[in-house]
Amino acid sequence: MAGNKNLAEDPYERLANAIILQAVADYRVALKKIKAHPKDRKAIDEAMEIERFFRSGWYSQLTSVNGEYLIKRLQDEIRQSESIRGRKNKSNRR
């Protein structure tokens, strides 16, 4: 039943997903570094390079997820996780 092949088992799809997941992980790390050290040029350059990837034609060939949407969601995630962590630390001091 070649016509019913599960796309999750397609090695090219798995590779595309792995590339995107690695870029997401690297972007999170870069954003966290920037949050901790806003003038860290290396982290800023890394984040900008990954943003270029998310906006590239190659990225859009790998996935149908809008790159701008992904960038915004990841930035929001880091902002929220940092503010939640700050609130937890303050409540632990009491």
Image (spheres, grey):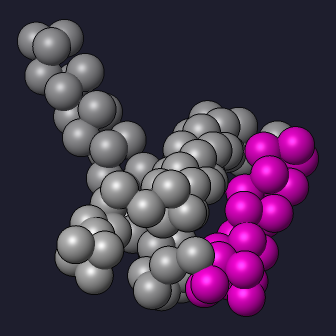
Residue nearer the viewer, 64 or 47: 64
Q: Is residue 45 above or below residue 65?
A: above
70 and 30: which is toward the camera = 70
The answer to whether any part of residue 19 appears in the image is: yes
Residue 59 among magenta residues: yes
Q: Residue furthest front?
A: 1
Question: Which contiguous range is marked in magenta?
Answer: 41-61
The image quadrant that residue 1 belongs to is bottom left
* Front residue (pair 45, 7): 7
Q: How many marks?
A: 0
**Is 90 in front, or is 25?**
25
Looking at the image, is 10 positioned above or below residue 41? Answer: below
Q: Position of residue 17 (x, y in %)?
A: 49, 59
Q: Is residue 13 magenta?
A: no
Residue 59 point in image, percent of width and height: 65, 77
State the image coordinates of residue 78 (x, y, percent, origin top left): 42, 51
Give percent across and percent down for residue 83.
Answer: 31, 45
Look at the image and tell me whether residue 69 can be seen.
Answer: no
The C terminus sits in image quarter: top left
Q: Is residue 65 left or right of residue 34?
A: left
* Residue at 30% over, 33% down: 86
Q: Is residue 71 left or right of residue 3?
A: right
58 left or right of 66? Answer: right
Q: Main secondary structure of the magenta part?
A: helix
Rendered position, 66 above or below 86: below
At x 18%, y 27%, the residue is 88
Instruction: State the residue at coordinates (89%, 47%).
Output: 41
Question: In the drawing, does residue 50 fall left or right of residue 40?
Answer: left
